[in-house]
Image (cartoon, helix red, strand yellow):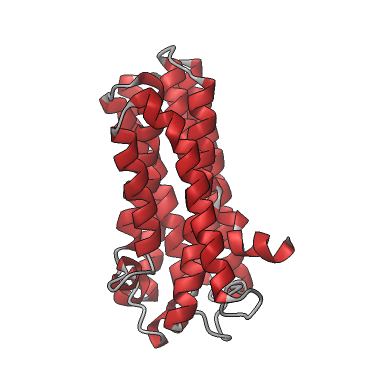
Amino acid sequence: MRIWLMAARLRTLPAAIAPVFVGTALAGHEGEFDPLAFLAALLAALFIQVGTNLSNDYSDARRGADTEDRLGPVRVTAGGLVPPRQVLIATYVTFGLAVLCGIYLIVKAGPVLLLIGAASILAGVLYTGGPRPYGYEGLGEVFVFLFFGVVAVSGSYFVQVESLEWEAFAAAVPVGLLASAILVVNNVRDLETDRRAGKRTLAVRLGRARTRVLYSAMLALAYVALIPLVVGLSWWVLLPLLTIPVALRLSTIVRRRTDGPSLNGALAGTGALQLAFCVLLSAGMLLT
């Protein structure tokens, strides 16, 4: 069980949970909260995230990207803890559970949810899998912004309200930026091993110094992106500003440190920051 929890990468799960909270809170602000839709969307998001992590574990091991000198946690396939075939089967099972959760959402909100779910699963697999994995071409942050921001927030909102308003897309921007920042920390940490493995992440393409600036810029822009929501909702949506001290501390760590333990801590901290930011944003929406 401990090995499978390691494979699931629990520290990445806030990125799947947080956008569902925000989309649901915005729907609740409009008096359209559906507890079953919320639960189904939350479970589907979690299963897609875990399935993506398992798929990446399997694909990176096959491509030789997860070597013994990497600074991050041990990967179960490359580390020989689980046979590749078992990891692949677990990937299929997890994505299958996500599909089962999505059935209710499709029945409730229509076939557009089928397209969203299929696209999300495909994006998870093709991050490091397939003939041309986009994660190896420096496009990971773009897809994380789209699927953990725009798609996840607006999709969670849509399954409750069954319509889309501009506030859903505006709320997705800071959520997507913080989710992308999680990947940026990961890629700063793995920059050297990724370069040797031929994995041309955005960090490899930009270099360490520029990627550190990008990380700080993403955190800053997440707070700036709250301004349109103030116009559309109220000043309560500025509650996430309470997390600025945490963001400043994380930015300092990423800017100054290169050792694995520090960057692993910054990775977990960025996930916690996103979750806290989104919980406070959700509370602000409900207080409006």
Residue at 61% over, 55% down: 10
Q: How many marks?
A: 0
Residue at 53% over, 84% down: 67
Q: Quadrant of residue 85?
A: bottom right
Residue at 46% over, 22% down: 285
Q: Is residue 217 above or below residue 259?
A: above
Q: Is residue 203 visible?
A: yes
Q: Nearer the viewer, residue 243 or 277?
A: 277
Image coordinates of residue 54 in percent, x first then y, are 52, 63
Q: Is residue 83 left or right of residue 247?
A: right
Considering the image in quadrants, where does the N terminus appear?
A: bottom right
Q: Residue furthest top?
A: 31
Image coordinates of residue 238 in percent, x first then y, are 45, 29
Considering the image in quadrants, where does the C terminus appear?
A: top left
Q: Is residue 255 visible?
A: no
Residue at 33% over, 39% down: 114
Q: Nearer the viewer, residue 10 or 80?
A: 80
Q: Is residue 42 above or below residue 237?
A: below
